[in-house]
Image: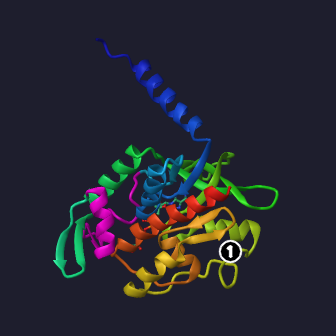
Amino acid sequence: MKIDEITISRAIIESFTREFLDNLEVDAAIAGAGPSGMTAAYYLAKQGVKTVIFEKNLRVGGGMPGGGMMFNRIVVQEEGKRILDEFEVRTTKYQKGYYVADSLETVATICSRTIKAGVKIFNLISVEDVMIDESDRINGLVLNWTATSMAKLHVDPLSIRSKVVIDATGHDAEICRIVVKKLGPKLRTKTGEVIGEKSMLADAGEKALVKNTKEAYPGLVVTGMAANAVFGSPRMGAIFGGMFLSGKKAAEVSLGLLKKA
Ligand code: 48F
């Protein structure tokens, strides 16, 4: 068979376009393919929820590939290990209650399991705004190519509709900040604004993470480091168990919202 360049182009464009069109209306749309976003997506898809992730970067994994200060390992505690076991990510016991995993194996395995569970991940696409209904409830995302915003090109975005949106954008809590900027200080925090994360205090940070994983605004669930940033809890560094547990809880909270919708 003689390989034809135009058939390659057609295969890529048609296949991508078909999947993008198929994800214009979904049950759950997630901003960010870090540990919390991919874990939330995985558990939602396992329950038959139509789920899509938009990741602004070229690669997935968020803060995982870099491990702790570029030592590409992550640490999880007992509860976090149970989730890694479910994904079949290998861990090594360091000492009682502390397990170490290769951060690249973790990213690759979770990403693969998440996609195979039925989640579509679109990389290189940034969430630049939310879509709202007449009562200001969030019901979708506004998207643009990351390269467009990096080049500061004046290009209008496209939108997708979703019954529930999850902010899994990490330390910057980008979607919650957009809500405050565009819709006012109406988050379910003490001030209605993003409180901002506190300095490192790993045990408290990990414990607060799951508690902070909730609906922060009608139609918007917040997970991962974004949850601690929004509700003003400490950071925790390269321990990742809380991120996986938070992702799992975000899936549960979102399922509850979907049942009510
Ligand atoms: O930062 P990230 O890994 O967030 P996470 O899931 O996990 C936090 C840990 O990695 C680490 C930590 C552990 O103790 O503190 O920091 O809470 O992943 C967030 C992802 O969201 C993407 C970003 O590129 C990253 O991959 N992201 C951020 N803003 C946007 C976005 C946006 N506006 N649109 C799309 N993706």
Write the residue at 40% across / 74% down.
242
Residue that lies at the very extreme toward the right in this rendered image:
134
Which range is magenta?
A: 59-88
Name the spot of residue 67 as percent of width and height, x first. 30, 69
Q: Measured from the top left, where is residue 141 in percent x and y? A: 64, 53
> Residue 114: in sight, yes or no?
yes
Label 1 packing within 10 angstroms: few (<14), some (14-19), many (20+):
many
The answer to whether the beta carbon of the residue marked 1 is less than 8 Å from any atom of ligand 1 is no
Q: Quadrant of residue 185?
A: bottom right
Which quarter of the rendering shows the N terminus?
A: top left
Looking at the image, which is closer to me, 191 or 80? 80
- Please give the name of the residue rendered at 75% of the width and 67% of the height, measured from the top-left corner: 183
For label 1, the residue is 187
Residue 60 belongs to magenta span: yes
What residue is shown at x 59% (from left), y 55% (from top)?
127
The structure's colour scheme is: rainbow
Left or right position of 77 against 232? left
